[in-house]
């Protein structure tokens, strides 16, 4: 177990010094309004209300606990273009810590099921170092999945232990079963994918522990009662975008295609990224989706045929499918609008892969097979170590995502925005143009492309993108403000006034918008209105020299030279 912990830590050594990513880390961690600033009221709100279409308050409470030790003086992080009050280091240490704990729990579970230390070790090593796990460990936002996996594995270990002591200590067995139900609930409070745990327990009960149907169903029902309310809450919260929907008859093919995808990535873990763009529409667009389902089905049939001779192999096959069930597309889910498949969905299913491979090595009973699998595990570890480098830096993360999937809208948009902040305007335009091409109804992409074109002096090209941004999102304050600047520079002050008034309705205390409104009023000869706008801007930011001088110029326009002198003199 110590060797497992050390091996896992070494593989993920790079992540200890990693930063935040612009992909969801802002939503869940460093810009989460309920964690910044950290308060009991904020955490309480997460327990009383859903956040970002999920009710997972325990996961956010754990994030809050980590944030307590991650507090840092406010500073701008240029890699994510945001001011931070928490450091990423403690979150990455916690992620690796939870993964190590899960690896050890995987070892214990595999040993209890297979009764072979060698098989358990092989299973745990595959679970620990497979490259498909890197996303879950290297991405701070997926700490939610790691914590859910932790409670799920504790629940399964406690459940199996309760069955093993049942004959000798029935009272202890009942206590353990009750405790396992609590851990199942905790897992659901971290991530709703744990909804399959009753099915997983039923599978273990019947295949490995040989528990009678009646007794197995009773336990599965107890766990079902624990998960059902949270499953219904999740279902009621999530609106599925049209891109994530599919016709009922297509769903088995989509699920088969997803299973084949995971099987391929299991044995050829190359070109891994956070967004494959593998939507139901794109899956059904290709003829192979109607055929590839046969591969996992054939493997399952072979496992079923040999279920009595190799029950652990059969169990591993079933667990692989069972853990993936919520995200296979048989039932539409929110993220499916972006992709049905994702590396993070394979986190717990990797236990099934480990059990199958370990049991196959045991069945062969050859040192050559053992050495071959050991060599493969070493190769997987090196691949994961390399793969983790893509999660260390936001720029590297975005660039790698685009290399694997050039149609990843978020990556094109975020990298373009980052390059724009770094004044690499030409490269920024390339990525932002691609983002607009891929998602013409994305208001942020339209606005940021307009801003990049504006910085190159291409005002005529920038204006329609700003217009489109406010059309798509009438509450987009920055787009109104940017549009007003184009109007001011092209001598259309009346249009600028209208745009700035719309912006100030959204954010009345924005000093820059007030100052620009004053400029527009002055251009139309409305000196009194201009003075009022300048004074309001200066009142909000009294240290701003430009706003102060504009008040003085407006006073001079009205012939109030003595008052103006107070603002114009240094």
Image: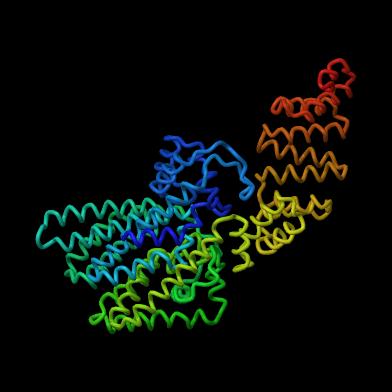
**Picture quadrant of residue 511:** top right
Q: Looking at the image, is 91 positioned above or below residue 34?
A: below
Residue at image location 39% in from the left, 52% down from the top: 190
Residue at image location 46% in from the left, 67% down from the top: 132
Q: Quadrant of the N terminus?
A: bottom left
From the viewer's perspective, tell me whether residue 8 is left or right of residue 393.
left
Residue at image location 79% in from the left, 50% down from the top: 455
**Residue 78 showing in the rendered view:** yes
Q: Nearer the viewer, residue 95 or 402?
A: 95
From the viewer's perspective, tell me whether residue 82 is left or right of residue 100.
right
Residue at image location 75% in from the left, 41% down from the top: 499
Can you give x and y, in whole percent of width and height, for residue 256 in the image?
44, 76
Can you give x and y, in whole percent of width and height, for residue 409 in the image?
62, 61
Q: Nearer the viewer, residue 391 or 82?
A: 391
Can you give x and y, in whole percent of width and height, for residue 570 in the image?
82, 22
Q: How many marks?
A: 0
**Picture quadrant of residue 75:** top right
Q: Looking at the image, is 325 positioned above or below residue 357?
A: above
From the viewer's perspective, tell me whether residue 91 is left or right of residue 354.
right
Q: Nearer the viewer, residue 123 or 315?
A: 123
Q: Nearer the viewer, residue 535 or 105?
A: 105
**Residue 236 showing in the rendered view:** no
Can you give x and y, in whole percent of width and height, for residue 354 in the image?
35, 71
């Amino acid at each position: 177990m110590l060797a497992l912990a050390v091996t896992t830590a070494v593989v993920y050594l790079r992540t200890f010094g990693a930063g935040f990513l612009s992909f969801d880390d802002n939503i869940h961690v460093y810009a989460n309004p309920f964690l910044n600033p950290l308060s009991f009221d904020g955490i309480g709100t997460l327990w009383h209300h859903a956040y970002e279409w999920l009710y997972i308050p325990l996961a956010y409470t754990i994030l809050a606990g980590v944030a307590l030790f991650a507090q840092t003086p406010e500073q701008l992080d240029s890699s994510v273009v945001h001011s931070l009050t928490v450091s990423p280091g403690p979150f990455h240490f916690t992620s690796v810590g939870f993964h190590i704990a899960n690896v050890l729990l995987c070892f214990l579970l595999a040993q209890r099921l297979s009764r072979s230390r060698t098989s358990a070790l092989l299973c745990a090593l595959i679970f620990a170092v497979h490259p498909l796990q890197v996303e879950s460990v290297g991405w701070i936002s997926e700490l939610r999945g790691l914590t859910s996996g932790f409670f799920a594995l504790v629940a399964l270990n406690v459940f199996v232990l309760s069955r093993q002591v049942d004959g000798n200590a029935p009272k202890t067995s009942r206590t353990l079963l009750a405790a396992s139900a609590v851990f199942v609930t905790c897992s659901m409070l971290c991530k709703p994918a744990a909804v399959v745990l009753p099915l997983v327990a039923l599978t273990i009960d019947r295949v490995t522990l040989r528990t009678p149907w009646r007794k197995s169903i009773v336990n599965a029902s107890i766990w079902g009662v624990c998960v059902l309310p949270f499953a219904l809450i999740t279902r009621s919260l999530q609106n599925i975008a049209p891109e994530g929907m599919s016709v009922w008859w297509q769903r088995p093919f989509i699920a088969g295609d997803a299973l084949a995808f995971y099987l391929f990535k299991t044995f050829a873990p190359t070109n891994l990224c956070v967004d494959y763009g593998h939507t139901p529409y794109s899956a059904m667009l290709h003829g192979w989706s109607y055929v590839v389902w046969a591969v996992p089905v054939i493997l399952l049939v072979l496992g079923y045929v040999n279920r009595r001779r190799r029950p652990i192999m059969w169990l591993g096959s079933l667990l692989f499918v069972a853990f993936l069930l919520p995200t296979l597309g048989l039932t539409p889910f929110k993220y499916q609008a972006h992709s049905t498949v994702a590396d993070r969905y394979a986190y717990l299913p990797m236990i099934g892969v480990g059990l199958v491979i370990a049991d196959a090595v045991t069945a062969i009973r050859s040192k050559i097979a053992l050495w071959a699998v050991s060599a493969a595990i070493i190769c997987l570890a090196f691949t994961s170590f390399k793969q983790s480098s893509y999660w260390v830096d936001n720029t590297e993360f975005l660039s790698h995502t685009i290399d694997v999937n050039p149609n990843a809208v978020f990556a094109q948009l975020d990298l373009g925005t980052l390059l724009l902040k770094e004044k690499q305007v030409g490269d920024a335009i390339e990525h932002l143009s691609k983002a607009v091409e891929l998602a013409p109804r994305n208001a942020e992409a339209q606005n940021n492309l307009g801003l990049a074109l504006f910085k190159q002096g291409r005002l005529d090209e920038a204006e329609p993108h700003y217009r489109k941004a406010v059309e798509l999102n009438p509450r987009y304050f920055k787009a109104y403000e940017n549009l007003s600047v184009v109007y001011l520079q092209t001598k259309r002050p009346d249009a600028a006034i209208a745009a700035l008034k719309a912006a100030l309705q959204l954010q009345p205390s924005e000093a820059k918008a007030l100052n620009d409104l004053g400029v527009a009023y002055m251009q139309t000869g409305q000196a009194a209105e201009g003075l009022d706008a300048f004074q309001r801007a200066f009142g909000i930011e009294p240290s701003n020299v430009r706003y102060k001088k504009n008040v003085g110029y407006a006073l001079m326009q009205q012939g109030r030279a003595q008052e103006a002198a107070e603002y114009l003199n240094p």
